[in-house]
Amino acid sequence: MRERLWGRGERLLPAGSTRAERGAFGEDLAADHCRRVLGYRQIVRNWRHKRYELDLICQDGEVLVFIEVRARAEDALVPGFYSVGRHKKDVLRRGCRSYLKQLRNPPKHFRFDIVDVSICKWGRGVVRYYANVPLFNKHFSVQRRKP
């Protein structure tokens, strides 16, 4: 897990923000963290297909990275990492499969990461990055079967 405090000399989340604004703020911080700190290349943000949504899809060298962003209040009872339960992982897995199926040449390697953004009452965000969270079983493959 990597952690970084944001907000000093940068934009802050205004007081009285809506849930959607807090979520967008968290996604902004997560995308910025992935680009500036980790050196990822962002491919798409908020990808949607049918009922599925993937917050961030990035490229880390030759690895495709699916990233779920969880923006939570600093005093939340459950941290963002633990708020991704079995049902949410099932939905994310189906979304990742949908994204991979639409690619002409799917990557050989991909993984799932979680970014937990903890927002304090002064509008600053603490980013915690969890890499390679188990989402796919070890036999999952995107190689298409020949008819």
Image (cartoon, helix red, strand yellow):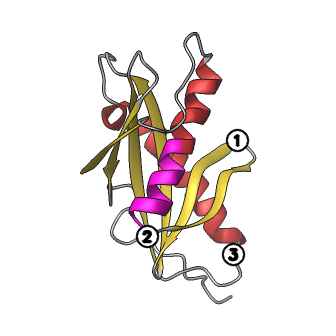
Residue 71 - label = none
Apparent side of residue 111 relative to residue 56 in the rendered image (left or right): left
Question: Which residue is nearer to you in this view: 53 or 30?
Answer: 30
Q: Main secondary structure of the magenta part?
A: helix
**As drawn, 44 above or below 11:** below
Farthest residue to the front: give it.
Answer: 9
- Marks 2 and 1 sit apart, C-alpha to C-alpha, by 22 Å
Q: Which residue is mark 1?
A: 51
Say which amino acid is labelled 3. Leu
Q: How far from the left and from the top, in percent, is residue 90? A: 48, 45
Q: Determine the residue positioned at 41% across, 36% down.
A: 8
Apparent side of residue 86 relative to residue 24 in the rendered image (left or right): left
Q: How far from the left and from the top, in percent, is residue 124? A: 42, 28
Say which amino acid is labelled 2. Phe
The residues colored magenta run 29-39
Q: Which residue is mark 3?
A: 103
Label 2 or label 1, whichever lies nearer to me, is 1
Say which amino acid is labelled 1. Arg
Contact between labelled residues 1 and 2, with CB atoms less than 8 Å apart: no
- Marks 1 and 3 sit apart, C-alpha to C-alpha, by 19 Å
Q: Which residue is mark 2?
A: 140
Contact between labelled residues 3 and 1, with CB atoms less than 8 Å apart: no
Question: Disc 1 or 3, which lies upstream in sequence?
Answer: 1
